[in-house]
Image: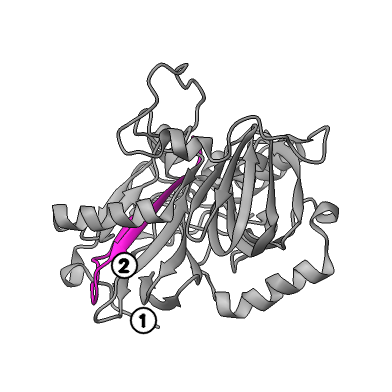
Amino acid sequence: MTETKITDPRDKLRGRSNVKDSPELIDFYDKLEKKSTTAFWRRANEIEPWEPITRYNPTLWRYGELRDLVLQSAELVKPEEAGRRVIVLMNDSDAGREHTACVGWLFSGLQVMKPGEITPAHKHTASAQRFIMEGGGAYTVVDGHQVTLNKNDYVLTPNGCWHDHGVFDDGKVSIWQDGLDIPLMNSLETNFYSVYPEETQKAEYNIDDSPLSYGAPGLIPAGRKPWDKPYSPLLVYRWEDTKKALYNLEKAGDGCPYDGYILRYSNPIDGGWAMKTMGAHMQMLRPNQHTKAHRHTGNVMYNCAGGKGYSIIGGQRYDWQEHDIFCIPSWVWHEHVNTSKNEEAFLYSFNDFPVMEALNLYIEEPLDDNNGYQVIIS
């Protein structure tokens, strides 16, 4: 390794590494290498950057190009043989391919199930969430709670919970987007995986008991044992409730300049994130709305839940329509545009914000130049 190269003028400031090589130092470094050590100042500027430097690229996955391949997988592989029949979305970067990540320490994929199929019950350290993209008659069972799944519903399968999925015999072919923190769990070397003694769980409660008990805004069951688990008792967030809440939010004010009208999927018990390591939002852009640009620590995966438009990410334009998926890496400028003159656009997203906030690492910054809008470079 050669001497530290000065690529940023700030690196010449006192407190940054600026050591020039000499024959004596090179000999010293060779001795260190043989002892599995190195001099900190040789790597300091690289491992302590002035601001976050992502290893991931903005990436767009077009649903129209992937849907046939997802359906083809249902003809080629049985879910009970695959464990989970998922087409993985990998970030267009070396880091994405190395870590099987869609962006940052997040994993995502498209899972398909046909009527009558089941995914065998299992559990793992990684937390999981689902966004239902199409189909009908699907369900999941989480620690004995069976919930039905409909288009644009947001579904939880928290870490450590037994869960299995299926589609009733009279249902339709169903496709949903999975989101997990598998790369994070593997980077922390904490990932465990177990299979259930039976192929599937037996539902221990009335079907849809979770949304029927906790789905009313501001209301929770009285007289029931207090919920003491570290995740939301509301295992499915219905699209019709979410959409109504967005329209109500629109009546309440002007919304966020960077995200339009945006709602967080929260734990109804304490108002916090629904799970400890991953969060999710649904946002609505008014017709012709163009949000201003900002950036933040934390990575985000988006799925267009309705409408069409584009996002400018790091100066590049990415056009999207229903169920196209795209990502925004940490600390990259981004803004959104609804190109319709008379219809709203809806964007579902999931993120690693709960981890950022728990570690006191979440930082957000608006773009001040050009009245808050990026210049499109490509």
Q: Position of residue 172 (x, y in %)?
A: 65, 65
> How many neighbours does mark 2 have within 10 angstroms: few (below 14), some (14-19), or many (20 or more)?
many
Mark 2: amino acid: Glu
What is the quadrant of residue 174 in the picture?
bottom right
Secondary structure found at label 2: strand
What is the quadrant of residue 340 in the picture?
bottom left
Rendered residue at 64%/40% (across/down): 141
Q: Earlier in the sequence, mark 2 or mark 1?
A: 2
Which of discs 2 and 1 lies nearer the camera? The answer is 2
Task: Check the image and report above or below for 375 versus 250.
Answer: below
Task: Check the image and report above or below for 6 versus 200.
Answer: below
The residue that disc 2 covers is 335
Residue 320 visible in the displayed image: yes
Instruction: Give the alpha-carbon distance from disc 2 to disc 1, as whole Å.
Output: 14 Å
In the visual, does 175 lie left or right of 337?
A: right
Identify the residue at the far right of this view: 81
Q: Which residues are magenta?
A: 276-296
> How many neighbours does mark 1 have within 10 angstroms: few (below 14), some (14-19), or many (20 or more)?
few
Mark 1: amino acid: Ile
Quadrant in which the N terminus is drawn: bottom right
Residue 128 visible in the displayed image: no
Q: Position of residue 354 (x, y in %)?
A: 43, 39
Mark 2 and mark 1 in contact? Answer it, CB < 8 Å. Answer: no
In the visual, does 254 lie left or right of 1?
A: left
- Asked which colour scheme the image uses, the reply is one colour
Q: Position of residue 328 (x, y in %)?
A: 44, 62
Disc ID at residue 377:
1
What is the quadrant of residue 300 in the picture?
bottom left
Q: Is residue 287 magenta?
A: yes
